[in-house]
Amino acid sequence: MISDTLSAQAVALAVEVFLRLPIPIAAFAGEGEDALWNEAWRRSLGGEEADRRDIRACLTALGLDAAQRDRLLLDLAPGCALEEGPEQVVTLRDGRHRVWQFGSVPLPDGGLCVAAVDVTERRREEEETERMAYLDALTGLPNRRLFDDRLNQAIERLRRGHAGFAVHFLDLDHFKQVNDSLGHAAGDRLLQQVARRLATSVRRSDTVARFGGDEFGVIQTDIADARAVAALADKLIQRLGRPFRIGEHAVSTGASIGLATAFHPDDIDAARLMQAADIALYRVKQAGRGSYAFATAAETGQKDSAEAG
């Protein structure tokens, strides 16, 4: 008798916990003739109460089409832990789109107990963290990691028969003087304004990145010859040569640019292209800054030989 009483109390407690859980949870009978759901599940779905007795109808009420619904049910049928279950974008009764992660437990009668947890904010934070891993924190431009990825993409496009491209390795002239005379905060503001001018000087298909310090890189895509590369380099130098307004100060700087082009897929790799652009930039600095120069990937081998000797 005591055992029966405890069993009844345990069942009542379990049902109370089930109903009060803050996450949506529902238990569906094998033939879909009956169902039990908690308040969180009920609040999430639109439709009539009767429409929620079948799990397929419930998932349809959450905005899933037939293919999404059937794929989700296939994943849930054998049972899966909530923290390891499939994710799905659902539409709640108030119209909000959320990302739910589902878990399930098969029931003895062939039914299924399904629970869901809202992971929308967690996924947004993860996406933002991932996005920031590829962006420069100061300027919002792509960083060197993303630049290298885009450079390898450009190389692969060239190998598949697409047009050539060029790398612009850019260094600001007299940036140290700005930092020394106006302070690092002014230097940061200058870098932010430089980033905006660079970004608005290229096409959307091109990439502008900040490598760090006062070094920037540009990948100029879909070019037919070196004249287009020289034209863009001229444009960048002219725009960065105009004064910048930093607080009450008009700050003048400039830019030196090393250029490396790629028109043929033979013997092209990212490291050699960047090395060639670096060689070209060094030439400009040696010649007095404020201009641009070209170097070829073949010259990187000559430099390696000279350094080895």
Image (tube, rainbow, N blue to C red):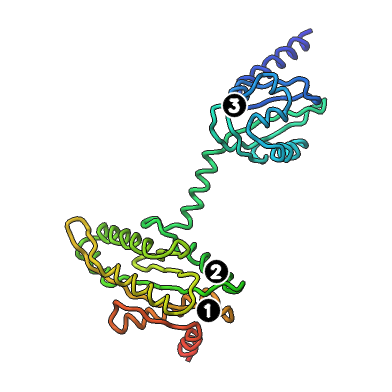
Q: Nearer the viewer, mark 1 or mark 2?
A: 1
Percent across and percent down for residue 234 are: 34, 74
Mark 2 or mark 3, which is nearer the start of the sequence?
Answer: 3
**What's the CA distance linking mark 1 and mark 2?**
14 Å
- Residue 149, compared with residue 111, is above or below; it is below
Residue type beneath disc 3: Ser
Residue 239 quadrant: bottom left
Q: Which residue is mark 2?
A: 152
The reply to whether the C-beta atoms of the residues labelled 3 and 2 are less than 8 Å apart is no
Task: Residue at 63%, 31% (x, y): give it.
Answer: 62
Residue type beneath disc 1: Phe
Q: Which residue is mark 1?
A: 263
Q: Estimate how packed mark 1 is, as few (under 14), some (14 to 19) or many (20 or more) residues with alpha carbons within 10 Å.
A: many
Residue 285 quadrant: bottom left
How many numbered marks are there?
3
Q: Which residue is mark 3?
A: 44
Task: Residue at 67%, 31% (x, y): give it.
Answer: 60
Percent across and percent down for residue 214 are: 34, 67
